[in-house]
Image: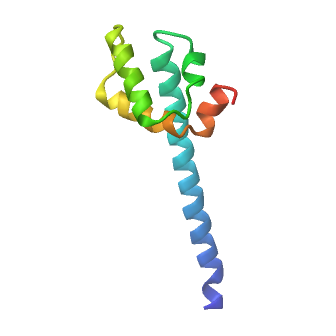
Amino acid sequence: MIKNLPLLALIFFLLFTVNAISVSAQDNECATLFATACSECHEIEKGCDLLGQSKKEWHELFEYMESMGAEISDEIEEKLLACLVIPGDAIKALCKK
């Protein structure tokens, strides 16, 4: 078993690294989507001020924005909801929070 310890340590390290890279890439994708989608109609700061609101609150806001002429597909809304309810480090950095 001790002979396999370095191999096990390497496996755990690789799994952790791959997971961290995946989370980071997803976080960066969220920040990019947030910045591009929201800035089409208004300053990003409007969205930044609302980070951490509930899914219901964001959905209601998206409905309001759509009634004002915004075009937000269901796919984009779902992605944004996942990003904005529990914002990651990339969005926080973008918002300077």
Query: Residue 66 versus residue 93: which sits nearer the camera?
Result: 66
Quadrant of the snapshot with the C terminus: top right
Residue 78: give x, y in percent of width and height. Answer: 36, 34
Query: Residue 61 versus residue 69: which sits nearer the camera?
Result: 61
Tell me where residue 91 sits by quadrant: top right
Q: Is residue 84 above or below residue 60?
A: below
Query: Residue 82 versus residue 13: which sits nearer the camera?
Result: 82
Residue in view at x 64 percent, y 88 percent: 3
Residue in view at x 30 percent, y 28 percent: 74
Q: Is residue 34 above or below residue 78?
A: above
Residue 39: give x, y in percent of width and height. Answer: 51, 14
Does residue 39 appear left or right of residue 70 in this picture? right
Residue 16: give x, y in percent of width and height. Answer: 58, 61
Does residue 33 appear left or right of residue 49 in this picture? left
Residue at the extreme left? 74
Does residue 73 appear left or right of residue 9 in this picture? left
Residue in view at x 38 percent, y 28 percent: 59
Q: Is residue 18 above or below residue 54?
A: below
Quadrant of the snapshot with the N terminus: bottom right
Query: Residue 86 versus residue 88: which sits nearer the camera?
Result: 86
